[in-house]
Image (cartoon, rainbow, N blue to C red):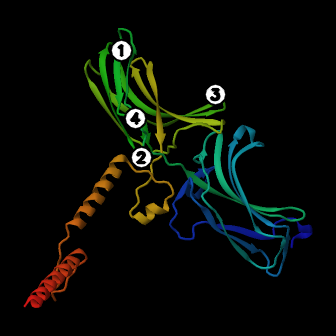
Amino acid sequence: MSLFGFGSSCDIEFELDRSGKRKQIELNEDGKKTKQYIYYDGEDVGGTVHIKLKKPGTKIEHQGIRLELIGQVELYYDRSNHHIFTTLSKFLCYPGEISENLSVDFNFAAVDKPHESYHGANVKLRYFLRLTIIKRFSNTTKEEEIYVHTLSAYPESNNSIKMEVGIEECLHIEFEYNKSKYHLKDAIIGKIYFLLVRIKVKYMELAIIKREIIGDNAQNETDTVVKYEIMDGAPVKGESIPIRLFLGAYDLTPSMRDVQKKFSVKYYLNLVLVDEEERRYFKQQEIVLWRKADKYKSKQERSDQMQVYESAQDQLRSKLENQHITDRKRDIKVRHDENGDLLNNSDETDNEADSDDNRNSRKNTRNDSD
């Protein structure tokens, strides 16, 4: 035991993925790369805590060992006050002493995780496990972060975006995007029509802008996620420029609105035209990003996922396949193997048995009459 009970006399490790199948996400914070296990809303959070003594033969007296699962919002400009929106707690051990290495299993069942984990420029939303060995003088604590993905269903309405913008008697363009809500692996498809061109356009570019809003618009942080050139040179009247931008290659998060009344995250499509005098003309349009469930290889893997949403097309296809299988079962005919035995004889054998009984009864009737 350390002098006067101060300092840590043990190492604490969390084992969260005993099966080795859980996905991980790689994060880069303050120049350090870390990996965290991914969980979903409604999913159990369980594993094993290993407490290892630094020196064999020593003892740790404690007033109990407590494990907590916490979800909280941290504002960087106010690090002293954290907003906790989810907390679960349980005692793993009652007061006593630890005289040898200890491993304790734990499980938090069907944990409510209402928000997606988020690491932004001015705010962080995180979930973590905190183990506390309660001691007389100073507690020993250890935290382990987990990363939460929040899945969404396909939006019921997803209208296209179509707008006309321009400068009077100088420039008149019409842009159209195929929809207003995109999942994180989606592709933005659209067109730009030049209805009137009386200025010398040098080039045109499209950008995705991420805006992080803290409080009631009190503090904004704008970041350009991606920017690429879609046209080089002067267009002519009636010309059409196609747009195709794949989102899966970029580090995006779902849109967030008024999370715990602390922050929001919004995304915009920013269309910019630059003329030969380097004057810039731009138009922004907000889009909504959402996370779509991954497609798994087997039904067992899908059942392990607590929250999986499929498209209406997939559901219809599955329904038709099930109906086809049912119809095939109804049309199965009696087959024989090489020895002449029946392979499927559920309904047909019953019918044959009934017909044999009828024949035998008719024979018996004739014999009686004779």
Specify which label sits upstream in the sequence, 2 or 4. 4
Q: Nearer the viewer, mark 3 or mark 4?
A: 4
Q: Residue at x 17, y 78 (%)?
A: 335
In the image, is 331 to the left or to the right of 45? left
Q: Secondary structure at mark 4?
A: loop
What is the spatial separation of the Cα atoms under label 3 and label 2, in whole angstroms? 29 Å
Q: Residue furthest top?
A: 169
Specify which label sits upstream in the sequence, 1 or 4. 4
Q: Which residue is mark 3?
A: 217
Q: Secondary structure at mark 3?
A: loop
Q: Which residue is mark 4?
A: 158
Specify which label sits upstream in the sequence, 3 or 4. 4
Q: Which residue is mark 1?
A: 171
- Quadrant (top left/top right/bottom left/bottom right) for the N terminus: bottom right
What is the spatial separation of the Cα atoms under label 2 and label 4, in whole angstroms? 16 Å
Residue 11's spot in the image, x, y percent? 74, 69
Is 67 situated above or below 151?
A: below
Q: Are marks 1 and 4 in contact (CB under 8 Å)?
A: no
Q: Which residue is mark 2?
A: 185
Q: Nearer the viewer, mark 2 or mark 1?
A: 2
Residue 114's spot in the image, x, y percent? 60, 47
Q: Residue at x 62, y 50 (%)?
A: 29
Name the amino acid, label 4: Asn
What is the spatial separation of the Cα atoms under label 2 and label 1, in whole angstroms? 34 Å
